[in-house]
Every structure is written in C-alpha cells, then in structure tokens.
Amino acid sequence: MTAPALALLLAAGVFAVGDWVARASKNAPLEYLCKPATLAALIGAAVALVPVHDAGARRVWFVAALVCSLAGDVLLMFPTDRFVAGLAAFLVGHLCYVAGFWADGPSGIAFVVTSAVVVVVVVPLGRRILGAIGGRRGLRGPVALYMVVISVMLATALATGNVLAGIGATLVVSSDAMIAWNRFVRPLRAADVGIMVTYHLGQAGLVLSLLH
C-alpha cells in the first residue's frame, strides 16, 4: 500500500462517514459534497495503489467501474428523478467490474457453482421487486436487465476466490437490493443510511481486492 493510496482511502472513509451523517440528518449540502467526494477518493486510491502482480488489467477496469459509479452517484443525488440514467451508469460500471474479474479469470467450474448460488438467492427477491414494479413508467425491463448484470458481477467476484472482492460485491448488491426494495416494494427503516453504508464499504472492498 503506497502512502498516497492510504491517504486517499482514509479520505474516502472520512467523506463516507460525512455522507452517512448527511443522509441521516437530511443535510443536502453536506451530501452534495461528501457523496461524490467518497467515490473520487476511492478512484484516486485505486490509481495510486500498487496492485498485486497480475492485477494490472483488473485495476484498469475497476477504475472505469468506479468512474461510472461516481456518475451514477451524481445522477441519483439530484432532486429530479434520474433513476433510469443512474441505473444505466451503474449497469455499465458493473459490466466493467465483470470485465476486470475476467481479466484474471476464475475457473469455469467455480463460476457455474457461484452462479447457481446467486440465482437461488436473487431470483425470489427479483420476482418480488419486478412484481411490485409492474408495468409502470417502463422500468420493469431496465431493472430486470440490471438485476441480471449485477448477479453476473456477484457470481464472478465470488468465483475468483478473492475474499475482499466477494465481500465487496456482496455489499454492493445488498445496497442495490435495499434501494429496489425501498423504492418499489415497501419503505425500509433507516434505508437511506443503510444503502450508503453497504455501498461505500462494498466499493472500498473492491478497491482493496486489487491488493490480493
């Protein structure tokens, strides 16, 4: 871990906590500062760290994924409803994560096994969410596609055997599941804070997985 990467990770942690406080207190100006700053610091950390010897290509894809995530954060931060645009940015980000994981590729057998596990968990949840969406505003198709992509991302991360990648991907998927459930099925208590805590910790885990 280089000194600049460590400093940027610490900065990301400070900004993340600031964003959690902003969400809890409904402090929009603080959120407008801390939410994008957290991902910007994580992008800097991913660029500044020295990845494990065979993770150079993975790092490139992960940085692209983080940039897309930052774009998604900004789009979803505005008061106007830009849900589909934000969803599209995160979808591209997850595709970048998938490409990064396959740069050092897991074994086919491992991917089949983890895919089966992910399907068992995600399908019941996905059915409930899609059922709650119905046909309103043409969201069913984009959300279904997003579920497929993020499920592939999670299965691939788990298949690599990289513990931090698996934990990070699981936390990011948990964050997205909370967003969907809170938005379409029923409101969740403390969802605003829980969504961001799992999201930020998940993204940090994916960045740190570059060291292993």
Image (tube, rainbow, N blue to C red):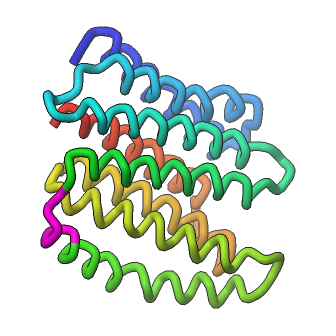
Q: Quadrant of the C terminus?
A: top left
* Span of residues in magenta: 106-111
The x and y percentages for residue 189 are 58, 66
Dominant secondary structure, magenta: helix
The x and y percentages for residue 156 are 28, 61
Q: Quick check: 58 above or below 149?
A: above
Count of numbered tags: 0
Left or right of 107? Residue 173 is: right
> Which residue is drawn at the image coordinates 66% and 71% (left, top)?
142
Q: Quick check: 9 above or below 70?
A: above
The one of 6 and 64 positioned closer to us in this rendering: 64
Left or right of 129? Residue 112 is: left
Q: Quick check: 133 above or below 159?
A: below
Q: Quick check: 198 above or below 15?
A: below
The x and y percentages for residue 83 are 73, 58
> Which residue is drawn at the image coordinates 68% and 70% (left, top)?
183
Check if residue 65 falls in the magenta segment.
Answer: no
Q: Quadrant of the N terminus?
A: top left
> Which residue is drawn at the image coordinates 32% and 76% (left, top)?
118
> Which residue is drawn at the image coordinates 38% and 21% (left, top)?
47
Left or right of 188? Residue 100 is: left
The x and y percentages for residue 164 are 23, 46
User: Which residue of the protein is positioned furthest toward the right in this rendering?
Assistant: 80
The one of 105 and 133 positioned closer to us in this rendering: 105
